[in-house]
Image (tube, helix red, strand yellow):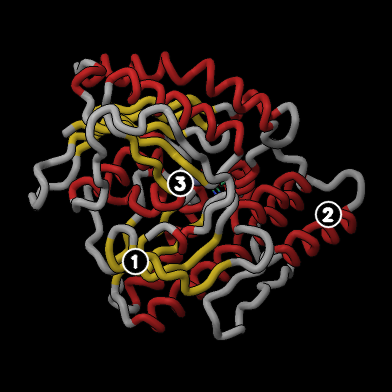
Amino acid sequence: MLVLGFESSCDETGVALVRVPAPGSAEAPQLLAQALHSQISMHQAYGGVVPELASRDHIRRVIPLTREVLAGAGIALTDVDLIAYTQGPGLAGALLVGAGVAVSLAAALEKPTLGIHHLEGHLLSPFLSADAPEFPFVALLVSGGHTQLMRVTEVGQYEILGETIDDAAGEAFDKSAKLLGLPYPGGPHLAKLALNGDSTAFELPRPLLHSGKPDFSFAGLKTAVLTQVKRLGEAPTDQQKADLAAATQAAIVEVLVKKSMLALKMTGLKRLVVAGGVGANSVLREQLNAACAKRGVRVHYPELSLCTDNGAMIAMAAAMRLQRGMAILPPTGQGAGGFEIKPRWPLGAIS
Ligand code: KG4
Ligand code: ZN
């Protein structure tokens, strides 16, 4: 079976086509083609995502990207068996575009649809890599809007062990980067600046590091970075900025690594899966690799290009649900046309 997937929850329009092996087969679903358009350069002038501009750009991009994917895979639209889309969480207007297109296509083709949770897409994205994980595992989900540790027993079985009580790790990267005068989205820019910095040059807090629970808090770190930026005055040197970037990254990474190790200890599991945009951070990867190697834990990451939002992870999540018989396909044409998006949708509520 063929699954066409759409992602449009924020500032990336993603479309992908995945082939699903027969039910019960041990073979993994296979990515046939994908296309992505990032709106980053469009939002950069505003220092963050402008929701209305995001929705309009999704409208412009989604059909050409779909054509590109189908042509790339050499597949006709009529051969698609299931149309998946990000149902939430995300920006309401942006979600409506992907959902509207998916449901309209499905109605025209008389094919079923499946709404996917965006975070489930991130969580299952490492299954698209050559070194795919096996269930069960601990997942560290670190995106722009979420920071969670989970016990993942199977597709759809997600037990939240701990999460942030305020800002997400990606938000901490982005807000600190903004204070350092870096463009949106700050995470990758801050990481690049940190390459030339000394992380010990500034002392920054590691909130909740010793709480004994796999929970996080990053709001205080941003305030501490603001205090340091003010102290540096009007014209900080490039070295000072690089040092502060390195110190910020070190603080975020230390907390993420320590809490991941705690979650592994709590669950007794020996496998860690990292997902979400911050999972692309190379210092985080280095330190997680070292900490996991010490404890005999296998760690899996998505391909670098699949850490941030994309259509492949949505098509993959739908394919994995389909393969397990979890996606019940309604009879052709029935219920076509109606759909619901869920801008706020806790992951714990999806099983
Ligand atoms: O998962 P994602 O694409 O979007 C959400 O669903 O939120 O994550 C985006 C986040 C942003 O905060 C971005 O700054 C961060 O991931 N990010 C990084 C890196 N690449 C992306 N943060 C630190 N280092 C990176 N290399
Ligand atoms: Zn995301």
Residue at 60% x, 58% y: name it.
169
Report crowding for label 3: few under 14, some 14 to 19, many 20 or more residues within 10 A (C-alpha).
Answer: many
- In the image, taking residue 8 as reference, residue 23 lies left or right, namely left
The N terminus lies in quadrant: top left
Estimate the x, y position of residue 270 in percent, counting from the top left.
29, 75
- In the image, taking residue 102 as reference, residue 184 lies left or right, namely right
Estimate the x, y position of residue 349 in percent, counting from the top left.
46, 61
- In the image, taking residue 79 as reference, residue 346 lies left or right, namely right
Picture quadrant of residue 255: bottom right
Counting residues from the start of the chain, the first of labels 1 and 3 encountered is 3
Picture quadrant of residue 5: top left
Q: Is residue 91 shown above or below 254? A: above
The dot on residue 118 is 3
Residue at 80% x, 62% y: name it.
223
Report crowding for label 2: few under 14, some 14 to 19, many 20 or more residues within 10 A (C-alpha).
Answer: some
Estimate the x, y position of residue 55 in percent, counting from the top left.
60, 26
Total count of labels = 3
The C terminus lies in quadrant: bottom left
Q: As shown in the figure, which amino acid type bears the numbered disc 2?
A: Val
Q: Is residue 141 shown above or below 207? A: above
Residue holding disc 2: 229
Label 1 vs label 3: CA separation?
16 Å
The dot on residue 305 is none
Residue at 42% x, 57% y: name it.
350
In the foreground, 128 or 183 = 128
What secondary structure is marked by label 1?
strand
Q: As shown in the figure, which amino acid type bears the numbered disc 3?
A: His
Q: Is mark 3 within 8 Å of ligand 2?
A: yes
Q: Is residue 226 shown above or below 46? A: below
What secondary structure is marked by label 3?
helix
